[in-house]
Image (tube, rainbow, N blue to C red):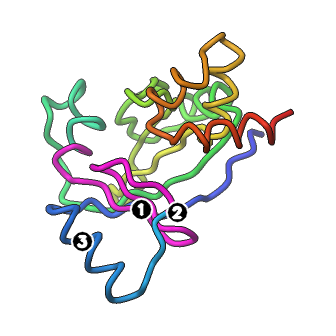
Amino acid sequence: MPNIQYSMVVLFVEDIDKSKKFYQDLFSLEIEHDFGENVSFKNAFCLWQKKRADEIIFKSQRGGTSNTNKNVELYFESEEMEVVWEKIQKSSVEIIHGLKEEPWGQRTLRFFDPDHFIVEVAEPLDHVVIRMAKAGASEAEISHKTQLSPQKVRDLLKEAN
């Protein structure tokens, strides 16, 4: 059985800047990562620009638009992506997309739960950084691809050693 850890809820929003300001002003949430169209708050949840989420999640299978009115994604992480993918393939869930590498280097897969909420399983970002380094990518290349700061990449690589 693969080790899959719950990580956070992802809200798909129409205006990322407006939503980011709302949650920062109202709840004083601290931003952990701000990738422009995707913002994660420390120990909370993530915001994703809905239009970009539709492009990433549904483009290849559904022409760029979702057939669901759900604006929530449950996000899980696992370092055992191949094992998780094998398990999902053997189940009866409706698959959105199989195991793929996202533009920022993270491997993901997505499917629907019984109520048609989106469920994502992805490799942790620290695992992405380590995998890319083992493949020979420089710290600068990893930082550019993952959109993590050069310092964050260095810190993750130090922690791994």
The answer to whether the residue labelled 1 contacts the one labelled 3, judged by CB atoms less than 8 Å apart, is no
Mark 3 element type: helix
Where the C terminus falls, by quadrant?
top right
Q: Amino acid at mark 1?
A: Cys
The answer to whether the residue labelled 1 contacts the one labelled 2, judged by CB atoms less than 8 Å apart, is yes
55 is within the stretch colored magenta: no
Q: Around disc 1, counting alpha carbons within 10 Å, would you say few (fewer than 14), some (14 to 19), or many (20 or more)?
A: many
Question: Could you tell me which residue is drawn at 65 percent across and 10 percent down?
Answer: 136
Q: Around disc 2, counting alpha carbons within 10 Å, would you say few (fewer than 14), some (14 to 19), or many (20 or more)?
A: some
Q: Which residue is mark 1?
A: 46
Structural distance between the alpha carbons of marks 1 and 2 = 7 Å
Q: Which residue is mark 2?
A: 8
On screen, residue 55 versus residue 72, left or right, reads left
Q: Amino acid at mark 3?
A: Ser
Q: Could you say where residue 61 lies in the image, as x and y percent from the top left?
A: 24, 27
Question: Could you tell me which residue is drawn at 61 percent across and 42 percent down?
Answer: 151
Mark 2 element type: strand
Relative to the observer, which residue lies in front, 105 or 83?
Answer: 105
Q: Nearer the viewer, mark 1 or mark 2?
A: 1
Which numbered circle lies on residue 19? 3
Question: Could you tell me which residue is drawn at 21 percent across and 30 percent down?
Answer: 59
Mark 3 and mark 2 lie on one chain; the one further toward the N terminus is: 2
Relative to the observer, which residue lies in front, 64 or 87?
Answer: 64
> Residues in magenta?
32-53
Q: Amino acid at mark 2?
A: Met
Q: Could you say where residue 131 lies in the image, as x and y percent from the top left?
A: 67, 23
